[in-house]
Amino acid sequence: MVKNNETLIQEIVEAVGGPENINSATNCMTRLRINIKDQDKVQHDTLKNTEGVMGVVDADTLQVVVGPGKAKKLADLMGEKYNIPTSSDSSNGANNWQDTKQSVKDRQSQGKLKNALETIANIFIPMIPAIIAAGIFQGFSSLIGTMMGEGTISGDVWEGIRITFALIGNSFLGYFAIFTGVNAAKRFGATEALGGMVGAASIAAPLVELSTLVGLYDAEEPLNSILTTGKGGIIGVIFGVYILAKIEKAVRKRVPDVLDLILTPVITLLVTILLMAFVIMPVSGFLSDLLVRALSVIIGSDNMVISVISGYILAAVFLPMVLLGLHHGLIPIYAIQLEALGGVSLFPVLAMAGAGQVGAAIAIYMVAKKSGHTRLKQVISGALPAGILGIGEPLIYGVTLPLGKPFITAGLGAGFGGAYVMLMGVTASAWGPSGWVALPLMQEFSGILHYGIGILISYIGGFIITRAFIKEKDIEHV
């Protein structure tokens, strides 16, 4: 009988030391993220062996892998049953001084780079469902438009569907900067509506008028302007909201309580928007342009050899980046590509990494079957369907990583799929889970086709290399 969510969350809470040992909890796409007070009270073995738990990642925040959909439901249940606040709720100073002290220690121990990358991740993680949905609708709208242009389909019904899909997709992607501003404000402790206004100001039409007035606008080549709408993109918005939070706190300290509601937002926005327009956006725009040009050399190269090599390396090293937490730093790059190029070419390449794990797992299953390793066969049988659908954590933390060698061979196999996808110029309308569920995110029918072929190549590559290097003795200790 399948365990229900209420039973599962009860067992998880007990295994981590009870509700009194939890500061806060939240979720991402596949993981329940729990902020623990005392790590010594966590029963790691019990937690890892709990039915319904696909894996456990011991990090600054304890991450329990439970799969897509279930992660959100369990986080909600944790709040409803045990009155445990979400991470964003707990950032308002409600925790006692011991919790705050522990949080500071944890942040210091994980390093500035990892802390910055996790902050970026926490800004974008709540938006992932919208990013996926908007990307799918945009992709289908583009596909229908292409088919209508080629005469494959026609009529007002198809045109109505195309427009409706474009409406849904643009409702998020067209205002991505605003949503980013709101979430960044939440992370940095600023008023969320003011953060949204900073994001909105970065794409507002009057910005062009201001730029023209001060001589920063290039009417002949608007994209070359020092200041124009969208200049600096998401990087500019995040940094602008960070400055907004600093200014708002400083102003609020100095403004009398009776005038706080009026003066604090007015002064804060005036100073922040001026800094955004004349400092932050031009500087971040320059940096973004450099990044796009660098990416075009590595990722969008017309040289076949460079495309193949870069695609192979990116797909092969992606999972080690995930283990180190460095993959969070790729999210702004996705956003920059989407804004500057209208699509994300990096995501389809990196998605091949999970497919390599699937191929490796199948090879290990064959070895386990031959040697009679029943437990490993059961683990792979349970994790493989999720891996095929793009949820790689069960295979990573339950199979390839504990064995060691397959984690490397899976990456080496995935590299072949990455090389193919890069060579074919596959571009996505958004980013999200990998595997076959990402097919609708690919632009154009050819992109969908080549992405699917890339997955199959990664399966085969991961299988062949792993099967060549893994022997029965390699799985005995698992």
Image (cartoon, rainbow, N blue to C red):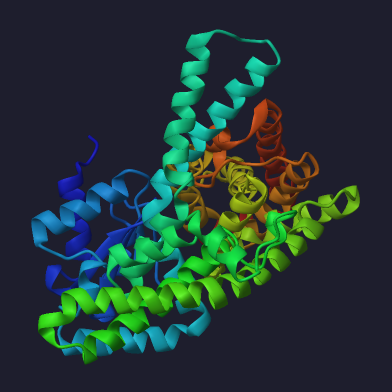
Q: Which quadrant holds residue 403?
A: bottom right
| Residue at the outermost top position | 155
Q: Which quadrant holds residue 48?
A: bottom left
Residue 148: in sight, yes or no? yes
Q: Residue drawn 17% across and 80% down?
A: 260
407 vs 245: above or below? above
Q: Position of residue 394 (x, y in %)?
A: 45, 51
Q: Position of residue 407 (x, y in %)?
A: 61, 58
Residue 183: in sight, yes or no? no
Viewer-closest of 397 and 353? 353
Viewer-closest of 260 and 352? 260
Q: Residue drawn 72% across and 49% down?
A: 413
314 vs 355: above or below? below
Q: Residue drawn 68% across and 18% down?
A: 149
The image shows a total of numbered marks equal to 0
Q: Position of residue 378 (x, y in %)?
A: 43, 42
Viewer-closest of 62 and 27? 27
Q: Residue drawn 28% across and 86% down?
A: 251
Q: Position of residue 76 (x, y in %)?
A: 20, 52
Quarter holding the N terminus is top left
